[in-house]
Image (cartoon, rainbow, N blue to C red):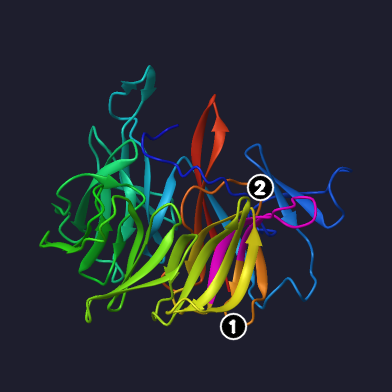
Amino acid sequence: MPAKYHVLSRPVLVLLCASALLAVTACNGNQPESRTVVKDSGTRITVMDDHSESVYTKLQLEGIDRIEGVRALDWISGDTLVVSRENRSLKPQTVEGVMRYPVNLYSHNLADGTQTPLLEGESDYGAALMSPDHKYLFYRQIDEYIGDGYVMNLESGQSVKISEAPFSSEEGEWVDDQQLIFPDMEGSIWRKDVNGSGGIILKPGVPYVHEVVQSGEVIYYVTGEDMQLSAYNTGTKETTVLKKNIVWVIPSPDGSRLALVERNRPGEMVLTLCDTAGNEQSRLAAGQQVFGTSWSPDGSKLAYSLIPGDSGSAQSGVFITEAETGEQTPVLADIEISDRLRWSPSGNALLASSTVPKEGALSFVAYVIRLS
């Protein structure tokens, strides 16, 4: 691995629609007639070519940009990304007998491909997430699967430590432009502002608390072996148990609905839309794996990746689905994504990262999917 920090071990294959930026070759005899294959830098990517009205929405694919050697984390603006990559200007370190370069943070300009350091050093930095107003960068100084949390003011370049101790690198979400929420390793939920002020806001009373996110006055979190989803109202101080067997919870931008990934039984996950009380409104997808779910900024669409339970009878990949109608558009194929999908501020592009074999190791590749 090029980075010491955790690449999510939830393998997800993704669908790739035809791109004007990639060369398309004809299907071979082993491919179904509805598929073609894109070849780029030695990578084979399946392109779905099913134009049935039941599959495709009005969403149009404008093109796909591939960025080698970086893990794309979020959007700083519509034309600039925050990425992590190996800093090969520093000396490599030997970790468990393997030589590794420190992983640092950079801004990546999509127009000309230039990269500018955001944070360099001997430590590994990653798991970065922009504030809603795109003025602050939340990131972790990572050691294996945990890390201390920091917030960088992008205008000044100054960082403030916000965590009292390391916590999971998969946790931590923005509450608003100024505050973040995250659980510690003891099961307490913290809320801190960009200056490092704040403290414990909730102690659920169990040792393992995860999938912590706040929407409006409500804090959602998952606990226990039965993966119980609870909602804590910060105004009334009351906690309500909503559902069990919840893997991920993703509130809509306006807070009126929840996208829930539920484990129905071993080997099956279901993506549903629910109201804030957990009442199911619709089912969007089901399969062996559903991962990376993300709302578009206007709350009209959901992007997610899917591996079907029966790989021989359904399409694997990343889809964009209209929340109101359930209509789907396939987006990327035959790639394992590493992080949650990220929408651009305008909602006209989608960001995905994956790993590919390179020189006997895994190297990150980022994809910018431009839509209209």
**The N terminus: image quadrant:** top left
User: What amino acid type is highlighted by mark number 2?
Assistant: Asp
Residue 117 drawn above or below residue 217: above
From the viewer's perspective, tell me whether residue 173 is left or right of residue 246: left
Residue 177 point in image, percent of width and height: 24, 71
Task: Please name the residue that numbered disc 1 is placed on.
Answer: 324
Q: Where residue 66 sits: x, y (%)?
A: 55, 50
Where residue 261 appears, x then y in whole percent? 52, 63
Q: Residue at x 73, y 55 (%)?
A: 47
Identify which residue, 10 or 348, lies in the foreground.
10
Q: Residue at x 80, y 55 (%)?
A: 313
Please check the rendered image and state whether residue 255 is part of the magenta-colored stretch, yes or no: no
Q: Amino acid at mark 1?
A: Glu
In the picture, measured across the screen, residue 293 lies left or right of residue 102, that is right
Queried whether the magenta region covers residue 317, the answer comes back as: yes
Mark 1 residue element: loop
Q: Secondary structure at mark 2?
A: loop
Mark 2–mark 1 distance (CA, rounded to whole Å)? 28 Å
Q: State the residue at coordinates (20%, 56%).
A: 151
Label for residue 94?
none
Q: Quadrant of residue 132?
A: bottom left
Q: Quadrant of the C terminus?
A: bottom right
Could you say which quadrant of the image residue 263 lies in?
bottom right
**Looking at the image, can residue 193 be seen?**
no
Q: Give the answer, above or below, for where 240 lies relative to 221.
A: below
The residue carrying mark 2 is 334
For disc 1, the neighbor class at 10 Å (few under 14, some 14 to 19, many from 20) is few
Whether residue 18 appears in this view of the structure is yes
